[in-house]
Amino acid sequence: MRTYRALSALLTYPTADLQAAAPAIRDTLAEGLLPPAQIAALEPLLRDLETQDLYDLQERFVLLFDRSRTLSLNLFEHVHGESRDRGGAMVDLLETYRAGGFDLQGPELPDHLPVLLEFLSTRPQAEARAILADAGHILVALAERLNRRASVYAPVLSVLVALAQATSETEEAKALLAEVDDNPEDLAALDAVWEEAQVTFGPDPNAGCPVSRDILAKMDMPLSPTRAPQAQAR
């Protein structure tokens, strides 16, 4: 379903091309997978993409998703951190992608949520929901944390929670929700969290971001291949 591709686009780093693609994303969301109320909840983010200053959009994205570990879009960060288990989980996920004919290229890790959503857009609906449900507890935690911050991105995660039919009542979800949220303004604390090197796993980081590019190419819109340099550093 192309809706997964549209949701993936909404969770990617804002660029001028992503802004230009907002109408195409809006049209894709109306393909029938989501009820009208969920589509309406996504409209503020789409309007922001269309009307807000690009630098402000990028700064907000980095503050949320790059500077806060508890809001990381790398899903295994929430359950494995930097442990060796994360590497094994990455390998398993890559094998799932390859078995489905999905060739991951670019700088993002396999567990990056927009990457997973792009893969799900290529799968039958029942399979896509089942795979998304495996990450349901993480999606619940991300949705709750974004809702606490009244973030315009919160409805995207709420939609994914609904698609996954996830609940906050599982032990896994409760454990994640019990964690203290990072404060992205507390640079000293964030430095301590990120002082260990990130897992280096996946394709050449200089290869651009073809997954994101593919999202918009299939909506007849190009996407710039890389982030702005200031967004790369944590």
Image: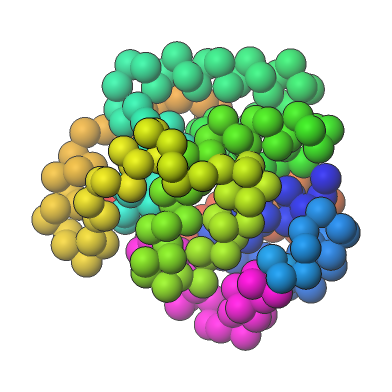
Instruction: Between residue 205 and residue 188, name the one nearer to us.
Output: 188
Instruction: Between residue 215 and residue 1, name the one nearer to us.
Output: 1
Residue 81: give x, y in percent of width and height.
Answer: 31, 31
Residue sitting at 21 percent across and 33 percent down? 196
Quadrant, the N terminus: top right
Residue 158: give x, y in percent of width and height.
Answer: 57, 58
The answer to whether residue 210 shows anywhere in this view is no
The answer to whether residue 110 shows anywhere in this view is yes
Q: Is residue 112 left or right of residue 200?
A: right
Residue 54 included in the magenta stretch of the image: yes
Task: State the extent of the magenta-drawn residues as a range.
Answer: 40-64
Residue sitting at 63 percent across and 51 percent down? 162
Q: Is residue 32 left or right of residue 94?
A: right
Residue 166: give x, y in percent of width and height.
Answer: 56, 43
The furthest residue to the bottom = 51
Q: Which quarter of the figure has residue 110?
A: top right
Residue sitting at 74 percent across and 49 percent down? 5
Residue 43 included in the magenta stretch of the image: yes
Residue sitting at 81 percent across and 54 percent down? 33
Q: Is residue 2 above or below residue 103?
A: below
